[in-house]
Image (cartoon, rainbow, N blue to C red):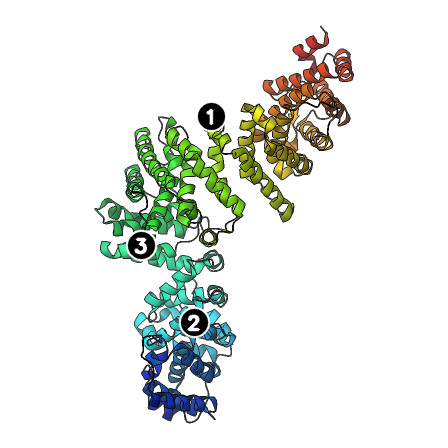
């Protein structure tokens, strides 16, 4: 590369050769094409590029093209030919020569870097070139230049480390409280080491890579986050503009959680600095900074215990309060409310401020929702308004639980008084009325719209806590809610828009999400006659059975070792139990309940041996027995599937209580003790239902003896001096009485045990004694 100096001197860095790179990227389609003379020159230059004998010839051809054939006049195919002729070898070698040093080079390192980055910037405008492995291999070098400046990058590389390691090491922040050469550089010194043109070229390449389908992951794996954080910390050239923008892209998509998991320390340090800048800015500048700050907040639940993050949230709330209390335009209010929603996601109401401000925040959100949604049907909401309203929804959701703590005259957890809680509930009711008005207008063609999903989710959070308000409106909306949930469940997560949107918030879209949010409301509404009749007309039981079937299939597919409890399945069982108790004729005739019985008979024998899923097993056991009590057995025998279910149910119920090895009170078994508060009522309902099953299907008594339930229960009651509570004693006595009435053999066994002993809890069951004719 001896003669590079002469070529370079004819065109200064950052001049016309940058016409095909950042700071002059190709304005595709904006030119009117080339003349015949220009085309002739271009063809000769392209031929020269392909057959260049050295780098000087290549650079000379490039300079001639840039002067005679402006990039704005080159169409995409011509640019592609130009890029292919140049290739990536030259800019990569220029960078390597600059950072490693070469005595044979006649150009100083800064000029080599300038040339290399300019060529890479030009090549990166082509997506194929931007995704080429050779270009991707230069990313650590570019990051090192941005983080440390070109001179520092060269010095580090000459220390014997590879460029990749240099970039990774250079991007690591200095330990808090320590001083290094990097940290000692003043912003002006750092800035003088990196001219704006070179910085722009580096950011052009990185931004082009980030725009590729796998680009964010490519940057993340090459330590882009810590390097860019350091560039901002050192106040390097363009770092506050281009650097923060690029970081924002990495932290706004699917790589957000991964980036925070890998580089939480660097990102948290950057967030602390940004929050201080925010709090020290003028009010007008703060409005423009709100959206930027949102990008740099961690995902909810991550770093939640960090004192630094807590300080950030407190500092930002202090700055937001006067903004919220001022008279704002809709354009100003939107970013403020979205940022407020994100802060609530991180730390709840703890740091928001005094109760009066909390009320103001909720009121502002509710007013925005009413103004945005109570428009005439058919009016399209702009993306900006949708984003604002989605933020308002999250503020409303966060306030629901706190406002519903108004049953006590004491001050609630959030500091709201009883009167303030009632005021908040009032404005929430008006806002959720607007949500229902909006959803009534939603056409099925928009079921895949993420904003519609956000609206449904918010409404369901209200219905989970409050179903007595707006009862008529809620009932009228049930057809939409059931139709919406059924469509998503049956499509099984195929809605790409929703999948992409939800994946940015958490693990992904499965198709059952809409119904999961609706389930608590269905549990409440199915217990009330009016809404229940509407739900039956909408075939809601079949929807719930379909949901349980899909969940069970998914559960089996994932394997039991890592299986976690799913509260949504338990809630679905509770809603189905309401239908079973209140609508016996529907249960007898509706085919979906036969499907449910088949599912229960398959699942319960498996769940009996899964202690972590004990509450779900209790739900399945109760639901199956409650259905069983409604179906008589004309043949006098139990079908195979029913037999399998009853056998599992009896084994399950038998394991709840334990009398121990000697006399003393009967206790809850160790396996049930942790979940007894939730499972106790289900266990009692199961025993009551078991008695009903025995009455309509006497053949079940044979299973009661075969599975050892009767022998175990009699022994436990005979040895145990007392049961955990009176209710437990009553349901056991009721079940034993039903068995004794329907099975002569069982009757005699019970009679024999009661006659042989006058100790234990069994001897105190007077109604059972009376039914057996004992004194």
**Label 2, on which residue?**
143
Circle 3: element type: helix
Tell me which residue sits at (40%, 69%) in the image: 207
Quick one: SS at disc 1?
Answer: loop
Q: Is residue 304 visible?
A: yes
> Alpha-carbon neighbours of circle 2 within 10 Å: few (<14), some, or many (≥20)?
many
Answer few, some or many: residues within 10 Å of disc 3's Cα (few below 14, many 20 plus, some between 14 and 19). many
Q: Which residue is mark 1?
A: 528
Q: Considering only vertical position in the picture, is 33 above or below 388?
A: below
Q: Position of residue 744 (x, y in %)?
A: 77, 15
The local crowd at label 1, few if under 14, some if 14 to 19, many if 20 or more residues have their Cα within 10 Å, is few
* Relative vertical location of residue 295 with respect to residue 75 in this rendering, above or below: above
Frontmost of labels 1 and 3 is: 1
Q: Quadrant of residue 673?
A: top right
**How far, Cα to Cα, is label 1 from label 3?**
45 Å
Query: In the picture, residue 190 is in which quadrant?
Result: bottom left
Can you give x and y, in whole percent of width and height, for residue 286 in the image?
Answer: 27, 55
Looking at the rendering, in which quadrant would you find the N terminus? bottom left
Of tags 1 and 2, the one toward the viewer is 1
Q: Nearer the viewer, residue 183 or 89?
A: 89
């Amino acid at each position: 590369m001896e003669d590079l100096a002469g070529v370079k001197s004819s065109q200064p860095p950052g001049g016309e050769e940058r016409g095909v790179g950042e700071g002059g990227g190709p304005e595709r389609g904006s030119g009117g094409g080339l003349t015949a003379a220009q085309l002739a020159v271009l063809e000769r230059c392209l031929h020269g590029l392909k057959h260049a004998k050295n780098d000087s010839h290549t650079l000379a051809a490039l300079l001639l093209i840039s002067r005679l054939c402006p990039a704005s006049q080159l169409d995409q195919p011509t640019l592609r030919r130009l890029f292919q002729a140049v290739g990536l070898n030259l800019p990569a070698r220029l960078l390597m020569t600059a950072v490693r040093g070469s005595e044979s080079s006649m150009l100083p390192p800064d000029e080599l870097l300038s040339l290399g980055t300019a060529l890479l910037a030009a090549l990166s405008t082509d997506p194929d070139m931007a995704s080429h492995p050779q270009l991707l291999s230069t990313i650590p070098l570019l990051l090192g230049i941005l983080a440390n400046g070109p001179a520092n990058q060269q010095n580090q590389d000459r220390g014997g480390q590879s460029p990749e390691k240099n970039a990774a090491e250079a991007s690591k922040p200095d330990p808090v409280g320590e001083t290094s050469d990097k940290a000692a550089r003043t912003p002006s010194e750092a800035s003088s080491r990196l001219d704006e043109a070179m910085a722009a070229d580096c950011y052009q390449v990185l931004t082009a890579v980030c725009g590729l389908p796998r680009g964010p992951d490519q940057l993340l794996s090459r330590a882009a986050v810590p390097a860019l954080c350091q560039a901002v910390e050192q106040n390097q050239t363009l770092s506050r503009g281009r650097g923060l923008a690029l970081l924002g892209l990495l932290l706004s998509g699917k790589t957000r959680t991964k980036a925070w998991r890998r580089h939480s320390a660097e990102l948290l340090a950057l967030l602390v600095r940004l929050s201080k800048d925010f709090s020290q800015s003028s009010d007008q500048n703060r409005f423009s900074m709100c959206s930027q700050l949102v990008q740099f907040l961690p995902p909810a639940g991550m770093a939640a215990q960090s004192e630094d993050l807590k300080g950030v949230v407190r500092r930002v709330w202090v700055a937001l309060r006067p903004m919220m209390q001022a008279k704002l335009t809709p354009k100003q209010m939107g970013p403020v409310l979205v940022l407020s929603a994100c802060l609530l996601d991180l730390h709840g109401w703890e740091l928001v401020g005094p109760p009066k401000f909390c009320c103001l925040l909720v009121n502002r959100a509710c007013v925005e929702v009413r103004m945005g949604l109570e428009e005439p049907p058919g009016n399209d909401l702009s993306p900006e308004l949708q984003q604002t309203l989605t933020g308002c929804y999250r503020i409303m959701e966060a306030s629901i639980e706190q406002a519903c703590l108004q049953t006590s005259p004491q001050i609630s957890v959030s500091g709201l008084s009883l009167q303030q809680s009632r005021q908040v509930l009032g404005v929430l009711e008006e806002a959720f009325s607007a949500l229902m008005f909006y959803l009534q207008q939603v056409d099925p063609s928009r079921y895949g719209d993420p904003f519609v999903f956000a609206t449904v989710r918010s409404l369901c959070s209200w219905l989970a806590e409050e179903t007595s308000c707006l009862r008529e409106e809620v009932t009228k909306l049930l057809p939409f809610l059931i139709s919406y949930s059924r469509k998503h469940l049956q499509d099984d997560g195929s809605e790409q828009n929703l999948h992409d949107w939800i994946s940015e918030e958490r693990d992904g879209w499965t198709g059952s999400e809409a119904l999961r949010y609706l389930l608590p409301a269905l549990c409440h509404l199915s217990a009330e006659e009016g809404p229940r009749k509407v739900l039956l007309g909408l075939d809601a039981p079949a929807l719930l059975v379909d949901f349980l079937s899909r969940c069970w299939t998914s559960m089996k597919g994932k394997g039991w070792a890592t299986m976690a409890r799913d509260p949504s399945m338990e809630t679905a069982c509770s809603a189905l139990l309401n239908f079973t108790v209140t609508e016996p004729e529907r249960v007898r005739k509706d085919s979906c309940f036969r499907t449910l019985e088949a599912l229960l008979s398959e699942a319960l024998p498996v769940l009996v041996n899964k202690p972590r899923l004990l509450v779900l097993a209790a739900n399945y056991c109760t639901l199956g027995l409650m259905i069983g009590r409604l179906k008589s057995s004309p043949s006098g025998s139990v079908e195979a599937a029913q037999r399998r279910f009853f056998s599992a149910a009896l084994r399950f119920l038998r394991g709840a209580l334990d009398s121990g090895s000697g006399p003393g009170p009967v206790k809850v078994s160790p396996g049930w003790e942790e979940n007894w508060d939730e499972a106790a009522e289900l266990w009692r309902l199961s025993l009551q239902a078991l008695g009903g099953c025995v009455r309509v299907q006497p053949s079940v008594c044979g299973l009661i003896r075969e599975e050892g339930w009767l022998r175990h229960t009699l022994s436990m009651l005979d040895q145990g001096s007392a049961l955990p509570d009176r209710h437990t004693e009553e349901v056991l006595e009721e079940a034993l009485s039903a068995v004794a009435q329907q099975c002569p053999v069982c009757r005699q066994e019970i009679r024999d045990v009661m006659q042989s002993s006058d100790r234990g809890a069994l001897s105190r069951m007077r109604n059972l004694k009376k039914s057996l004719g004992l004194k």
